[in-house]
C-alpha cells in the first residue's frame, strides 16, 4: 500500500521513555521493551504498533502489568502491525517481549549478524523488525538499554550514549547497560555485540568537554582506522568553526562492519559504517577511497546536529537531513582538499546520475509525494539534488545569511522532528526574505533548462541578457511552474579579463531580461558559475568562445565545463558519422578533428595548472553524460566513439602523454600523503597512463606492467590493473594474479572488491562470460552487498557494451540477479533493478528486451515491495 505525504497525521500516542533488554544467544535474541506511553486524556483510539510479523515471535504483551490476550485485547496483522484495541487514557506502561533470529536476517535491516557479530540498522524502518513499536521519526524518546551476550564470542557490547554499568554472569555471559540522555526517534537506535578491536583517542570540544572516541573493526583491519580518526576530529573541529556546533556526548563510537546495505549510519553516539567507508591505508585504499572515508565520516558526524538533534517529522522530509548533511559534508571536503576539484566531482555526479534519474520514470521531487518502500528513496535526487537545493539558499543569502538561517533553525527546532518547510521558514525569517517560490524545488521533479541569449548594444555600451527557464514533464507532473533560480554570472572580454564583476541573478519567472550598462566592449558571458543551480544550460557558443572559457575563465568549474562541452561536441558529431558509416573499415577511418587535438594538447602540456583540474579537463565526458544527448541512445556507437577518441588522442599525443607521465613520477622515497597536491599528481599521472594504455601495443603494455611493479599505493596498483585488464596475455596474468593473491593473503576484502570491479567493467567481447565465471570464484559471496555491487552492479552500470548487448544476454543476467538477490536482500535487489529504468531511452529492440525483464521481475510471485515498486514504476513511467 502506497504511503502519501498528504496523509500525514500526528501520532495520537507518544513514548516518553524506552527501556530495552536484549538477551542474545546463538539461537535467538529475546527483546524486552518497557515503554512509558502517553496518549489522549479521553476516548483513546486503538494503539497501532509497527512490527514485521515474519521477524517477530511475540512472547507477551502487558499494559500496567496486566497480560493482554490475543483476539480480545489486541490483534496481530497478517503481515504487519499489532493493534491494542482499548488502551488506557493519558499514560500507561506497555511491556512487550519478542524473540527474533538475527542469524537468519539476510535483509541487513533490524538486528542482524555480520561475520559473527551482532549489529543493527534501523533507518528507515528497521526498528519494527526488532520489536513492536511506534516506528516513526516524530516519536522521540529517551532510551536505556541493557545488552547481554556470550563474553567469549561477543566481548564488545555497545549501544547509544554512555555506558552506565557492566557485569558478568554465570555460563560465560556478560552484560552492559547504556543511557542516552537525548531524546531520539527509534531509527537512531543502535546496538553492537561483537568481537572487535579498536583504536582510541580524545577530542576536546570548544567548551572543554572531553570526548572519548573509539573506532572499532575486526582485528585484521585495525591498521586501517587512523584516517577515519583524523577525519572525525577534523570534522568535529570544522563543525565548531563553520557552524558553531559542538558535540554533545562524552563518547563517540564508530563501528565498521562487512555486511551493510548502504554507506554508513548516524546512530546517536554509535555510528555504524560499511567497512568501505571507514578503512583506509595507502597500500589498500586509493586516493578516492581516502576522500570518500573523509567525506562519509564527516557526513555521519554532521548528522548529529542535522538529523539527530533536529530530525525529520516523517520520511517524506528525508532531504531535510540528507540534502543538508550532504551540503555540509561537501563544504567540509572542499575545505580539507580543493574546493574547485570537489565542486567538479559533485557536478559530475549530478549530471551523470541525478539528471538521469530526473529524466526517467523514477523522477521525484527532493521531497517525494508517495512511496511503497521508503528505502527506495535514498536517491541521488534526495541526497545530491537535495544538497544543491541547500547550496542555492547559500548562494541566494550569502555565507553569513545562510549561517544566520542555520542558527535560527537550530534555535527553533532543537529536539524536534520537523519539515522542509520549517527549514525554509528559518532561512527566510533569519534574513527577512520571502522564499515562498523556493518551495517549488521541493515540489517539482525534473531538471530545468535555462536558456541564455545575450545582446550587446555597442553604441549604448549596454549588454542585455535574457534568461528563460523550462522544465520537462515528469511522471505525474505534466506542467511545471517557474523555479527561483540563482544564476551566477560574470562578463569577460576576449582575453578573459573582467568586464562585469561576478553577481547572482535571480531568475524567478519564465523569462527575464537583465541589462548591464557601461560594458566597454562585446562581452563573453561566463554563465552558471560554480554550477550555481542544478539546471542544464542552453546557450549556443562557438568553439572559439568555449576555448576562450576553457583557457581563461577564472571560475575553475566553468573552465572545466567548457572543456567538457568542446569534447561532447566532437564526440557527438563523430557518433553521427559512426552511425552513417557503411562498415567497420569506414568506422575505423573516422578522424578526430585537428583543432580539438590541438586544444587538448595545449591542456596537456600547460604548466602551472592545479594537477587535479588538469586531470579532469583531460577526462572525456563519460557514457552516462553523453547518452543524455542521444535519442535513442546507441550504446555501440557511443562506446565505439569514446574508445576511438581516447585512442586517437593517445596515439597522436603519445610523446606528450609519455613526457607528462615521466615528469609526474613521484620522487624516490616520497612519503605518502593525501594532500591535494600529491593526490592531483597521482591523478594526472594515472590519466596519462590510462590514455597510453589505450594504445595497447607492446610498449604500452610494458609501461602498465612497470607502473604496477613500481607502485607503492593502491591508487597506482589499481591504475595498472585497469590499464592491463583489456589485454589478455602474460602482463595481465601477472598483474591480476599477484593483485588478487596479495589481497587474499592480507585479508583485504575491499581490495578484492576492486579486483572484481575492474574485470566487471572492462570493455571486452566476453565481458558477461567473465562476470559469470567470477561468480564461481572462491572469493565471490552473493550475501555480501559490497561484493555484489563490485561484480554484478558494476557490470550493469559500468559496462554499457556488455550490459546492453543486443542479444539481451546482459539484461537477462541482471534480471535474474535481481530476482535471486531479492530473495535475501530486497534493498540491494531494488537498487540493482533500477538499471532498467532508462529503458525508454533506447532503441525499439533494446526497449523490448529491457521491458521484458521489468515485467518478469514485477510479475514474479513473492517479489518484495521494494523491487516491485522500482519495476512497476519503471514500466508505467
Ligand atoms: N542515514 C544514512 C546516511 O547517512 C543512510 C541510511 C539509509 N539506510 C537505508 N537502509 N535506507 O545517509
Ligand atoms: Zn546521511
Image (spheres, grey):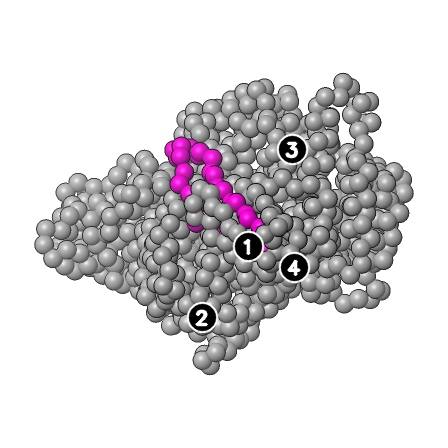
C-alpha separation, residue under disc 4 versus residue under disc 1: 14 Å
Image spot of residue 716 (x, y percent):
76, 53
- The mark that comes first in sequence, 4 or 1, is 4
Mark 4 nearby-residue class (10 Å; few <14, some 14–19, many ≥20)? some
Give me the residue at 37% from left, 38% from top: 372
- The mark that comes first in sequence, 4 or 2, is 2
| Residue 798, visible in the rendered structure | no
Give me the residue at 72% from left, 47% from top: 547
Image spot of residue 672 (x, y percent):
74, 65
Relative to residue 148, is residue 465 depicted above or below? Answer: above
Image spot of residue 759 (x, y percent):
70, 39
Secondary structure of the residue carrying numbered label 4: strand
Label disc, if present, on residue 499 of the rendered structure: none
For disc 2, the marked residue is 245
**Image quadrant in which the N terminus is located:** top left
- Disc 4 or disc 3, which is closer to the eye? 4
Q: Is residue 193 left or right of residue 10?
A: right
Secondary structure of the residue carrying numbered label 3: helix
- Disc 4 or disc 2, which is closer to the eye? 4
Secondary structure of the residue carrying numbered label 1: strand
C-alpha separation, residue under disc 4 versus residue under disc 2: 38 Å
For disc 1, the marked residue is 516
C-alpha separation, residue under disc 3 versus residue under disc 2: 45 Å
The segment highlighted magenta reads 462-490
C-alpha separation, residue under disc 1 versus residue under disc 3: 47 Å
For disc 4, the marked residue is 498
C-alpha separation, residue under disc 1 versus residue under disc 2: 41 Å
Q: Is residue 324 magenta?
A: no
Amino acid at each position: 500500500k502506497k504511503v502519501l505525504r498528504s496523509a500525514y497525521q500526528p501520532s495520537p500516542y507518544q513514548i516518553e521513555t524506552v527501556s530495552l533488554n536484549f538477551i542474545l544467544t546463538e539461537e535467538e535474541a529475546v527483546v524486552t521493551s518497557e515503554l512509558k506511553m502517553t496518549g489522549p486524556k479521553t476516548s483513546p483510539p486503538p494503539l497501532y504498533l509497527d512490527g514485521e510479523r515474519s521477524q517477530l515471535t511475540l512472547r507477551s504483551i502487558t499494559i500496567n502489568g496486566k497480560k493482554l490476550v490475543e483476539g480480545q485485547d489486541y490483534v496481530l496483522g497478517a503481515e504487519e502491525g499489532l493493534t491494542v484495541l482499548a488502551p488506557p487514557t493519558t499514560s500507561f506502561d506497555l511491556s512487550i517481549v519478542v524473540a527474533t533470529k538475527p542469524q537468519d536476517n539476510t535483509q541487513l535491516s533490524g538486528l542482524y549478524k555480520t561475520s559473527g557479530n551482532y549489529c543493527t540498522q534501523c533507518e528507515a524502518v528497521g526498528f519494527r523488525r526488532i520489536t513492536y513499536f511506534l516506528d516513526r521519526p516524530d516519536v522521540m524518546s529517551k532510551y536505556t538499554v541493557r545488552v547481554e551476550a556470550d563474553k567469549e564470542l561477543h566481548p564488545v557490547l555497545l549501544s547509544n550514549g554512555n555506558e552506565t554499568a557492566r557485569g558478568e554472569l554465570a555460563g560465560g555471559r556478560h552484560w552492559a547497560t547504556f543511557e542516552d540522555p537525548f531524546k531520539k526517534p527509534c531509527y537512531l537506535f543502535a546496538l553492537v555485540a561483537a568481537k572487535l578491536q579498536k583504536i582510541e583517542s580524545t577530542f576536546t570540544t570548544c567548551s572543554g568537554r572531553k570526548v572519548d572516541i573509539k573506532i572499532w573493526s575486526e582485528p585484521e583491519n585495525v591498521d586501517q582506522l587512523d584516517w577515519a580518526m583524523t577525519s572525525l576530529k577534523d570534522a568535529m573541529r570544522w563543525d565548531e568553526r563553520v557552524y558553531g556546533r559542538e558535540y554533545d556526548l562524552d563518547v563517540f563510537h564508530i563501528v565498521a562492519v562487512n555486511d551493510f546495505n548502504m554507506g554508513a549510519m548516524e546512530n546517536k553516539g554509535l555510528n555504524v559504517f560499511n567497512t568501505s567507508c571507514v578503512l583506509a591505508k595507502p597500500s589498500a585504499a586509493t586516493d578516492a577511497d581516502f576522500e570518500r572515508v573523509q567525506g562519509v565520516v564527516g557526513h555521519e558526524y554532521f548528522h548529529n546536529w542535522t538529523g539527530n538533534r533536529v530530525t525529520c517529522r516523517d520520511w517524506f522530509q528525508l532531504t531535510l537531513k540528507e540534502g543538508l548533511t550532504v551540503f555540509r559534508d561537501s563544504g567540509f571536503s572542499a575545505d580539507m582538499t580543493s574546493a574547485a576539484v570537489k565542486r567538479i566531482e559533485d557536478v559530475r555526479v549530478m549530471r551523470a546520475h541525478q539528471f538521469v534519474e530526473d529524466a526517467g520514470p523514477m523522477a521525484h521531487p527532493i521531497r517525494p509525494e508517495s512511496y511503497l518502500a521508503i528505502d527506495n528513496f535514498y536517491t541521488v535526487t534526495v541526497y545530491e539534488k537535495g544538497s544543491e537545493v541547500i547550496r542555492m539558499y547559500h548562494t541566494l543569502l550569502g555565507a553569513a545569511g545562510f549561517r544566520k538561517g542555520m542558527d535560527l533553525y537550530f534555535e527553533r527546532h532543537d529536539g524536534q522532528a520537523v519539515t522542509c518547510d520549517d527549514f525554509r521558514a528559518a532561512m527566510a525569517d533569519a534574513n527577512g526574505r520571502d522564499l515562498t517560490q523556493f518551495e517549488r524545488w521541493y515540489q517539482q521533479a525534473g531538471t530545468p533548462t535555462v536558456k541564455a541569449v545575450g545582446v550587446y548594444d555597442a553604441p549604448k555600451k549596454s549588454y542585455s541578457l535574457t534568461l528563460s527557464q523550462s522544465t520537462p514533464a515528469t511522471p505525474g507532473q505534466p506542467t511545471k511552474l517557474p523555479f527561483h533560480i540563482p544564476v551566477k554570472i560574470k562578463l569577460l572580454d576576449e582575453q578573459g579579463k573582467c568586464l562585469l564583476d561576478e553577481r547572482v541573478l535571480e531568475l524567478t519567472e519564465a523569462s527575464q531580461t537583465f541589462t548591464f550598462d557601461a560594458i566597454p566592449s562585446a562581452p563573453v558571458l561566463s554563465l552558471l558559475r560554480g554550477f550555481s543551480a542544478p539546471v542544464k544550460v542552453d546557450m549556443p557558443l562557438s568553439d572559439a568562445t568555449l576555448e576562450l572559457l576553457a583557457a581563461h575563465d577564472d571560475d575553475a568549474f566553468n573552465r572545466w565545463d567548457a572543456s567538457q562541452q568542446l569534447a561532447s561536441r566532437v564526440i557527438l558529431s563523430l557518433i553521427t558519422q559512426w552511425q552513417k558509416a557503411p562498415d567497420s573499415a569506414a568506422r575505423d577511418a573516422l578522424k578526430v578533428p585537428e583543432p580539438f587535438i590541438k586544444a587538448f594538447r595545449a591542456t596537456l602540456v600547460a604548466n602551472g595548472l592545479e594537477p587535479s583540474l588538469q586531470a579532469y579537463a583531460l577526462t572525456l565526458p563519460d557514457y552516462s553524460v553523453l547518452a543524455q544527448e542521444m535519442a535513442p541512445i546507441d550504446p555501440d556507437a557511443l562506446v565505439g566513439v569514446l574508445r576511438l577518441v581516447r585512442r586517437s588522442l593517445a596515439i597522436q599525443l603519445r610523446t606528450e602523454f609519455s613526457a607528462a607521465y615521466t615528469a609526474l613520477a613521484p620522487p624516490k622515497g616520497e612519503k605518502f600523503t593525501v594532500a591535494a597536491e600529491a593526490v592531483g599528481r597521482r591523478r594526472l599521472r594515472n590519466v596519462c597512463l590510462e590514455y597510453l594504455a589505450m594504445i595497447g601495443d607492446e610498449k604500452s603494455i610494458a609501461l602498465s606492467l612497470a607502473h604496477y611493479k613500481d607502485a607503492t599505493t593502491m591508487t597506482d596498483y589499481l591504475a595498472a590493473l585497469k590499464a592491463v585488464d583489456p589485454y589478455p596475455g602474460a602482463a595481465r596474468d601477472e598483474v591480476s594474479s599477484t593483485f588478487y593473491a596479495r589481497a587474499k593473503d592480507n585479508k583485504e576484502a575491499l581490495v578484492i572488491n576492486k579486483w572484481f570491479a575492474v574485470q566487471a567493467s572492462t570493455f571486452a567481447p566476453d565481458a558477461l562470460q567473465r562476470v559469470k565465471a567470477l561468480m564461481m570464484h572462491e572469493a565471490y559471496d552473493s550475501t555480501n552487498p559490497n561484493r555484489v555491487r563490485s561484480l554484478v552492479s558494476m557490470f550493469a552500470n559500468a559496462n554499457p557494451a556488455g550490459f546492453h548487448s543486443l542479444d539481451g544476454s546482459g539484461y537477462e543476467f541482471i534480471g535474474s540477479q535481481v530476482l535471486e538477490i531479492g530473495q535475501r536482500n530486497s534493498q540491494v535487489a531494488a537498487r540493482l533493478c533500477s538499471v532498467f529504468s532508462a529503458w525508454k531511452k533506447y532503441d525499439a529492440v533494446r526497449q523490448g528486451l529491457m521491458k521484458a525483464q521489468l515485467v518478469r521481475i514485477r510479475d514474479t510471485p513473492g517479489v518484495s515491495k521494494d523491487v516491485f515498486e522500482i519495476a512497476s514504476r519503471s514500466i508505467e513511467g
